[in-house]
Structures are given as structure tokens and as C-alpha cells.
Amino acid sequence: MSCTLLERSDEYLVEARRAVWELRSPSLEEHGDFAGALMKVSDRAVQGTGIQFRMRSSGAKSKVAPGIEDNLLRICEEAVTNAVRHAHPKRVEVCLEYGSDQLRLRIRDDGCGFDPEGVNVTKNGHFGLMGMRERAKLLRGSFSLNSQVGHGTEISVTVHLTPEFSYS
């Protein structure tokens, strides 16, 4: 059984990416407050760009499993970073909505938008749209992407907070 150096390198890269996905975010450790951590990673992404950032939180805050917070934080960070890098927006907004049995995270920008059908998301292990979808799926949540060329983008993730949900 012989493996080429390239195949072995690919295996190591996939494993390294998996390890990165599983790290607990320092932003959550520092803040302890989920909305504050979302604000920090988003502010960091727009810093120095001239893009206006707005954070909104609504509903009665409830205790959320750390795994849910970690994954939603990473989704938010990726979505805001993508907006800054690719959409050239004037404004980015992050909304965190607590419901009685669900938590919804929305990230919107007024940038150039794109055709979601034309996006290349086939490379396994990348942290873009595919990674966001995979994280939402891991949480047994729903992921939606609405974008249109010239009209900005909205990403929404809804996670149901049922008592039996446990993240390991």
C-alpha cells in the first residue's frame, strides 16, 4: 500500500482543518456573552474598511450550549469576512434573535451580491459557504442564503434549542 506524498499531504491538510473547526473561540472565552463575541469578531473584520457595522440582539437571552455558540460565531465571522472581501458593502448588519425554543443568526450586507448557483463550493474542507452550511447541519439547524447580483446578501441560520439537544 503506497501513498504518494501529495495524497498524504492532502490527508494532513483535511485533518488540520478539522482540528481548527473544533477549537473553542477565544472571543467567547473572553466575553462570556455571545452577542458581545459576535460583535467583537464582526468589528474586527470591518475594522479600517469604512464599512458601517450594526449589531442587533432581540428576545430573552437564554443559556445556549457552547457548541452552538462556537459554530454560530464561526459562521458569523466567515460571513462578515466574506462580505468585506468580496461584496464591497457600505453596511453590514448582524442580528441575533432569541426565541422561546430557537436561536436565529442573520448576517446582511448591502454589497454587490452574487449568484449563489454560480459559486464554486466543491473543494472539501474550505471555510466558505460550504463550511457555513456544514456547521448549520452539524447543529441540526437550517441555513439559508439569499443573494442576487447588485442587491447584497443575507445569510440566516436557525437552531432549535430543545432540552434534548446536547453538543459533544
Image: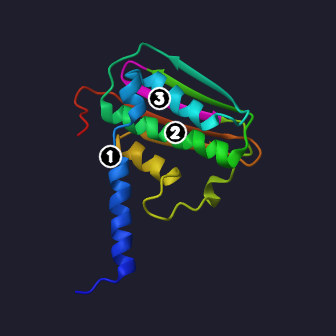
Check disc 1 and report its element: helix, strand or loop. loop
Q: Does the magenta stretch include residue 140?
A: no
Circle on res. 77: 2
Task: Please give the residue where the numbered disc 1 appears in the rendered image.
Answer: 22
Task: Give the residue at x 23% y 34%.
Answer: 166
Q: Does the magenta stretch include residue 102?
A: yes
In this orientation, which residue lies closer to the viewer: 101 or 42?
A: 42
Task: Give the residue at x 37% y 63%.
Answer: 14
Q: In this view, does 68 lie above or below 36?
A: below
Q: Distance between the residues labelled 3 and 2?
A: 15 Å
**Mark toward the start of the polypeptide (2 vs 1):** 1
- Horizontal and vertical percent position of residue 70: 38, 36
- Horizontal and vertical percent position of residue 148: 70, 47
- Horizontal and vertical percent position of residue 2: 26, 86
Q: Is residue 159 above or below residue 35?
A: below
The kind of residue tagged 1 is Glu
158 vs 1, left or right, is right
The kind of residue tagged 3 is Arg
Circle on res. 104: 3
**Mark toward the start of the polypeptide (3 vs 2):** 2
Colour theme: rainbow
Check disc 3 and report its element: helix, strand or loop. strand
In this orientation, which residue lies closer to the viewer: 153 or 52?
A: 52
Q: What's drawn in magenta, residue-wise? A: 99-108
In this orientation, which residue lies closer to the viewer: 131 or 85?
A: 85
**Mark toward the start of the polypeptide (3 vs 1):** 1
The kind of residue tagged 2 is Glu
Residue, far bottom? 2
